[in-house]
């Protein structure tokens, strides 16, 4: 891993593989670059396709810096980390793919800093992102409890198990989750001018359907991964093929 310091002083870890056109990858909540992109075969697939793959551990995750303050985890702050990483590497621009939380960050980056990104893939998100009432409480409680056997929400328990499997700082994740579950700036979607592909699994109840979200972004395309939920979509071959087709179009 290599490191740099983002504009607000957060230390960000990152890895780079391959040569060619730069492609920046933003992983999902409670994950890491290695879990989301390396273990799933994504990094190899993209390197073999001729991309220079840039993979940060998002702030609060993996080997990057960790704050326990909600204010440090806005989507804009995390989008700023992506741009700061491009600056650090001397890259004027890149394609950008995010999964779940990373997809939210990617869409905000496309809204706020469109001059730095070419094509955007927002995966693991869908119609649920348009819902202004996304209560973070159950997941925060699951992350902070000393006894996970007391967690009654199945979805929240999955986040807790995933966080523990990845050796995460659960207090940092709780602060992050509260921030990213604030109402998404849906009004900015109509102003995105970059090509966008929205991807969601057919049975992904956390994301919802891809098409309603894509419909809010001018010219965006939607792709549904057959028979896949939120966790199983990540490494799916159909998802990879759809992304390679989109990036190569």
Image: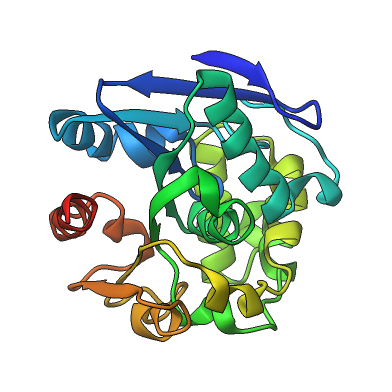
Horizontally, residue 34 falls left or right of residue 241, namely right
Image point (53%, 48%), residue name: 115
- What is the image's colouring? rainbow
- Residue 57 location (% of width, % of height): 54, 32
Residue 78, by quadrant, is: top right
Which is more toward the observer, 123 or 244? 244
Find residue 124 and report its horizontal and vertical position in percent.
Answer: 40, 63
Q: Residue at x 45, y 77 (%)?
A: 217
The residue under the point 55% across, 46% down is 30
In the image, farthest residue toward the top = 2
Residue 146: tell me if it is visible. no
Observer-nearest of 30 and 27: 27
197 left or right of 245? right
Q: Residue 150's spot in the image, x, y percent?
A: 67, 62
Q: Residue drawn at (50%, 35%), measured in percent from left and top?
A: 166
In the displayed structure, would residue 157 be above or below residue 17?
below
Residue 74 visible in this rendered orientation of the protein: yes
- Residue 10 location in percent, x, y? 75, 28
**Residue 163 position (above or below residue 121):** above
Q: Nearer the viewer, residue 132 or 194?
A: 194
Q: Quadrant of residue 141?
A: bottom right
| Residue 157 located left or right of residue 134 | left
In the displayed structure, 140 sits above or below 172; it is below
Q: Is residue 126 left or right of residue 45?
A: right
> Which part of the image, by quadrant, shows the C terminus?
bottom left
Q: How many marks?
A: 0
């Amino acid at each position: 891993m290599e490191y740099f310091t983002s504009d607000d002083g957060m230390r960000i870890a990152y890895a780079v593989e391959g040569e060619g056109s730069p492609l920046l990858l933003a992983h999902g909540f409670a994950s890491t670059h290695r879990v989301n992109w390396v273990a799933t075969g994504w990094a190899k697939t993209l390197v073999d396709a001729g991309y220079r793959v840039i993979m940060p551990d998002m702030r609060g995750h993996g080997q990057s810096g960790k704050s326990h303050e909600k204010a440090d985890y806005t989507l804009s702050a995390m989008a700023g980390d992506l741009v700061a990483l491009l600056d650090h590497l001397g890259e004027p621009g890149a394609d950008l793919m995010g999964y779940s939380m990373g997809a939210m960050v990617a869409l905000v980056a496309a809204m706020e800093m469109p001059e730095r990104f070419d094509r955007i893939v927002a995966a693991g998100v869908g119609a649920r992102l348009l819902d202004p009432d996304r209560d973070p409480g159950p997941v925060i409680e699951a992350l902070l409890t000393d006894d996970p056997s007391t967690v009654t929400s199945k979805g929240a328990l999955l986040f807790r198990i995933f966080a523990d499997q990845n050796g995460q700082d659960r207090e940092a994740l709780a602060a992050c989750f509260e921030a990213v579950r604030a109402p998404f700036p849906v009004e900015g979607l109509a102003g995105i001018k970059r090509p966008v592909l929205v991807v969601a699994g057919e049975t992904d109840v956390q994301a919802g359907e891809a098409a309603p979200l894509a419909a809010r972004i001018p010219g965006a395309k939607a792709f549904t991964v057959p028979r896949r939920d939120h966790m199983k979509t990540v490494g799916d071959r159909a998802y990879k093929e759809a992304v390679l087709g989109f990036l190569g179009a």
